[in-house]
């Protein structure tokens, strides 16, 4: 079997990870992205990873469980699929707090950094670009960040950072 260059990009999520979360404190981050730039940050811990690999490695499903500082429990999962022709991953995030959005984030890793993008609609109807950044720092450390842009990707506002360790 040929090794596909990006097929193993998310294998690091097969393990169980401890996650230190820092996210901007806002009811819903997409409600008012401009005002959220000045929102306070909150911190909480979670566990994640524990990925299931399917379809010969072309599908990964990983999990997240945590409790926000206000006591709200959150359980979520990312469903990722790999397209070997394009050498890119597409994935969706699903959780128990918000309606399912099947608009995928799409992108790839270059070395140890992965960039993934999607465009959704903000509450006021304008296009909102979303960027997920993954950084792998060796076997025992990784970081995920979420950022929003209302100007087509000219500027980004990071609103959630997760530091993974094991």
Image: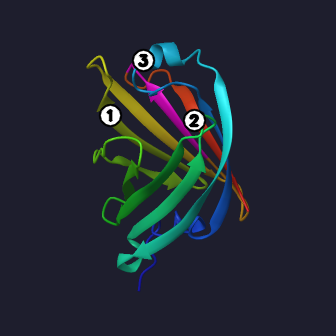
At label 2, counting other C-alpha atoms closer than 10 Å, the crowd grade (few under 14, some 14-19, many 20 or more) is some
Please name the residue that numbered disc 2 is placed on.
160
Looking at the rendered structure, the secondary structure element under dot 3 is loop
Which quarter shows the N terminus? bottom left
Q: Looking at the image, is 93 positioned above or below residue 52?
A: above
The total of numbered circles placed on residues is 3
Instruction: Judge depth for marks 1 and 2 and give the one in front.
Output: 2
Looking at the rendered structure, the secondary structure element under dot 2 is strand
Task: In the rendered structure, find residue 119 and report the number of the disc placed on it.
Answer: 1
Separation of disc 2 and disc 3 at Cα?
A: 15 Å
Q: Which residues are magenta?
A: 144-151
Residue 19 lies in magenta, yes or no?
A: no
Which quarter shows the C terminus? bottom right
Instruction: Judge depth for marks 3 and 1 and give the one in front.
Output: 3
Residue appearing at x 30%, y 44% in the figure: 101
Q: Residue furthest bottom?
A: 1
* Residue 96 coordinates in the image, percent (x, y): 41, 48
Looking at the rendered structure, the secondary structure element under dot 1 is strand
């Amino acid at each position: 079997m040929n090794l596909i260059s990006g097929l193993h990009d998310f294998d690091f999520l097969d393990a169980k990870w401890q996650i230190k979360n820092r996210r901007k404190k806002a009811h819903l981050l997409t409600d008012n992205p401009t005002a959220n730039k000045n929102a306070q940050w909150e911190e909480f811990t979670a566990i994640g990873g524990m990925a299931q690999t399917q379809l010969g490695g072309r599908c990964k499903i990983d999990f997240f469980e945590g409790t926000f500082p206000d006591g709200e429990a959150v359980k979520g999962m990312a469903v990722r699929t790999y397209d070997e022709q394009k050498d890119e991953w597409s994935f969706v995030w699903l959780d128990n707090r918000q309606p399912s959005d099947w608009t995928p984030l799409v992108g790839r890793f270059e070395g140890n950094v992965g960039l993934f993008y999607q465009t959704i609609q903000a509450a006021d109807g304008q296009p909102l670009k979303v960027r997920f950044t993954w950084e792998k720092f060796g076997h025992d450390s990784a970081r995920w960040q979420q950022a929003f842009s209302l100007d087509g990707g000219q500027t980004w506002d990071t609103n959630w950072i997760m530091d993974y360790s094991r």
